[in-house]
Image (cartoon, helix red, strand yellow):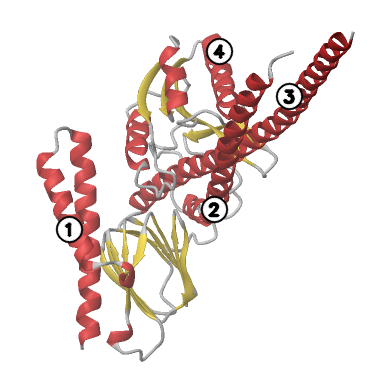
Amino acid sequence: MASTQVLKSRIRSVKSTKQITKAMQLVAASKMRRAQDATKASAPYTQAARELLASISGHTSVAHHPLFEKRAVKTRLLIVIASDKGLAGAYNSNVVKLYAEQLIQDDKAGVKNATIAIGRKAAQFASRIKDTQVLGVYQDLPDRPDGSELSAILDSVRTQFTSGSVDAVDIIYTNFISTVAQVPTVQRILPAGLDATEQTGTSGDATYEPSSEEVLDNIAYRLVEAQIFQALLDSRASEYMMRMVAMKNATDNANDLVDDLTLEMNKARQGAITQELAEISGGVEALNE
Amino acid sequence: MQLQLITLLGVKLDTEVYELLIPTLAGEIGVFPGHEPLVSVAVPGAIMVRYKKGDADKDLEYFAISGGVVEVSQTKVRILVDEAEHGDDIIEAESKAALARAIEMRDKAKDQVELERAHELVDRHTVRLKVAGLRRRHHRQ
């Protein structure tokens, strides 16, 4: 049996670890709440952009716009969103697993692949892969993104697509469905689709200034931006949620461990006392004889 | 008519208004209730809002916006922009300093990416400063 001294120091170290995980859990919880609110707040923007696109599609031919052009996919661009830091449970490994599956899929179909990595963990993985060409790496995005950090990503995505270097753009992110379900998801961003909005097209009689092409260009750009932004916010909320759960588990485990170690220490202490008593009484016996 | 000012960060304004001035690619447009349906491209600048008919000029409110899309229908105006900021929330001195920093960054930019980012910042802070100025001018009267 380990000595009381050793057990005592182990308990102390587990307890301090517990304090850290507990603190990280609380931090993640408050960040998660904020991220969740942000996810909800940006929804009207996406919705409005979709509606505008639907109504304009009744007015001008959308299919000829460079951002809507459907081509045979020879090269696919994947935007992978993971976190900068670890200790978030299965968050990063889920994303990376899906990413790897997509790469294998492309490989089998003979499609070339390019990657834009957002978050250090995504970047680290992508840089080790031979099958993909890394076009850009974005790390340390702020905790509360406001859209301005997206402009560089957005510009490079648009240039890649309109110049024909890539024929499709997908985004891999973690969809924040609820506090108990976060699902890694692949979503097509370009060519921009009109899915789920086709039936409307009511304001076909509106005037377009300066021209419907110019307006369309703007709306399409905004829709793509909104989709990437939404994906980023969803990923953030999921990351904090999963980190919170992981840290809660760690705290619970630390509690269990402290209980076990305390029990063991008490046993060891009692054992030592019993042994000492036995030795003393044995000594007294020996003197009396 | 109903005005909805929608940004990436959420709905900034959703209220009844009487008159609007919006900077667009085709020039600044004034919108009153019953305007013909119109979709246009907004450029960075100041939106002026008059809430009720007969409101004095000092009650006008200004918003600094980045580029976006404007949709006008008979009863509703929807403005979709990346960013919108109320004139009262802009601190003039801060904007001035930020503009100076942005200009310095533009002059020192090493590559194209940095230059573009700097240009963006210069535009942004110029607009903010303009909005802050507008507000001050009217409130003094």
Mark 4 touches mark 2? (CB < 8 Å) = no
Q: Residue A1 at what x, y percent from top left?
A: 74, 13
Between circles 1 and 3, the one closer to the viewer is 3
Out of B3 and A123, give the one closest to the viewer: A123
What type is the residue that disc 3 sits on? Met
Q: Give the CA distance from mark 1 to mark 3.
A: 63 Å
Q: Give the CA distance from mark 1 to mark 4.
A: 51 Å
Between circles 1 and 2, the one closer to the viewer is 1
Q: Give the CA distance from mark 4 to mark 2.
A: 33 Å
For disc 2, the marked residue is A43
Q: Is residue A282 above or below residue B31?
A: above
For disc 3, the marked residue is A265
Q: Residues within 10 Å of mark 1 (few under 14, many from 20)?
A: few
The subunit carrying tag 2 is: A
Q: Is residue A18 above or below residue B46?
A: above
Taking the view exactly as shown, the residue that stands out farthest to the bottom is B54
Q: Give the CA distance from mark 4 to mark 3.
A: 52 Å
For disc 4, the marked residue is A104
- Residues flagged by tags 3 and 2 on a common chain: yes
Mark 1 touches mark 3? (CB < 8 Å) = no
For disc 1, the marked residue is B97
The subunit carrying tag 4 is: A
